[in-house]
Image (spheres, rainbow, N blue to C red):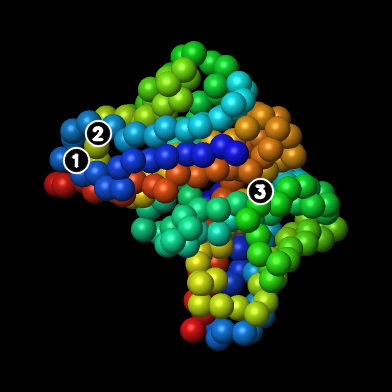
């Protein structure tokens, strides 16, 4: 158990819908990262937040957005869902936003299926 | 942009034997970290081993060791005395000193034959 929690574990929805994925980082970690794992794109970095502020953006679609709240939990919002958004979405957390020795710990992931 | 390449989509090995998984990467930076992650059927991402680029000594964690060739930009994982529980997808990953994001390879599926 990494100490990072993600809810829900599974999510099944229809095209065009909107969903919210939730992540609680390890106690004391200030950075949260979101990754997408799909069959065709592999594991891709989406976005990073540090202490409530966006730090880095990867290949995140405009239909996707995220935020980190004052209690440091994070939410990833996916809207106008398409079949191709079906994937495993991981959240990871780390203590800081810099430095080589800033290990990321992964949550168990949320499996999203868009029908 | 940094890229990570794993050229072996699948590998298999007999239980108790040794197997080596390959990884190459491309970067213009001098300070960075390299990682091997294991993803078993449970889908949990588990850190296996990490290597700091400025350290010449290869990292070792019990039965897992790496062969880090900085000039060749190669970072292979050796698993000794393979066990059935080692069966999983293995991902090689890169993280730079500046950006914190992990850049992953496409993965290698490792099968252990009893």
Residue A62 locus on image (x, y percent): 71, 67
For marks 1 and 2 on the same chain, the one whose residue lies earlier in the sequence: 1
Please determine whether, in this image, residue A90 is positioned above or below residue A101.
below
Callout 1 touching callout 3 (CB < 8 Å): no
**Residue A104 appears in view:** yes
Query: Same chain for marks 1 and 3?
Result: no
Front residue of A29/B89: it is B89
Q: Quadrant of residue A6?
A: bottom right
Callout 3 touching callout 2 (CB < 8 Å): no
Q: Residue at x 31, y 48 (%)?
A: B9
Front residue of A106/B71: it is B71
The residue that label 1 is drawn on is: B13
Mark 3 to mark 2: distance in Å? 31 Å
Q: Nearer the viewer, mark 3 or mark 2?
A: 2
User: In the shown orientation, is residue B60 left or right of residue B78?
Assistant: right
**Residue A9 appears in view:** no
Q: Residues within 10 Å of mark 1 (few under 14, many from 20)?
A: some
Q: Quadrant of the N terminus of chain B?
A: top right
Query: Same chain for marks 3 and 2?
Result: no
User: In the shown orientation, is residue A16 left or right of residue B38?
Assistant: right
Mark 1 to mark 3: distance in Å? 34 Å
- The chain containing the residue under callout 3 comes to A
The residue that label 3 is drawn on is: A93
Callout 1: SS: strand
- The chain containing the residue under callout 1 comes to B
Q: Quadrant of residue B92?
A: top left
Mark 1 to mark 2: distance in Å? 6 Å
Please determine whether, in this image, residue A50 is positioned above or below residue B36.
below
The residue that label 2 is drawn on is: B19
Residue A83 locus on image (x, y percent): 51, 77
């Amino acid at each position: 158990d990494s100490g990072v929690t993600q809810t829900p574990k599974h999510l099944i929805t229809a095209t065009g819908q909107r969903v919210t994925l939730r992540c609680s980082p390890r106690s004391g970690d200030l950075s949260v990262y979101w990754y997408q794992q799909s069959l065709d794109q592999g594991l891709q970095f989406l976005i990073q937040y540090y202490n409530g502020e966006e730090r880095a953006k990867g290949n995140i679609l405009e239909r996707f957005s995220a935020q980190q709240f004052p209690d440091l939990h994070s939410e990833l919002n996916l809207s106008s869902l398409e079949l191709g958004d079906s994937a495993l979405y991981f959240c990871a957390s780390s203590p800081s936003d810099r430095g080589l020795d800033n290990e990321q710990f992964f949550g168990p992931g949320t499996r999203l299926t868009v029908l | 942009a940094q890229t990570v390449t794993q050229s072996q989509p699948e590998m298999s090995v007999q239980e108790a034997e040794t197997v080596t998984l390959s990884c190459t990467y491309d970067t213009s930076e001098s300070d960075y970290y390299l990682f091997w992650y294991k993803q078993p059927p449970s889908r949990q991402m588990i850190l296996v081993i990490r290597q700091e680029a400025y350290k010449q000594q290869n990292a070792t964690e019990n039965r897992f060791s790496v062969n880090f060739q900085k000039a060749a930009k190669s970072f292979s994982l050796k698993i000794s005395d393979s066990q059935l529980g080692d069966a999983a997808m293995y991902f090689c990953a890169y993280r730079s000193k500046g950006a914190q994001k992990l850049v992953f390879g496409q993965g290698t599926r490792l099968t252990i034959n009893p």
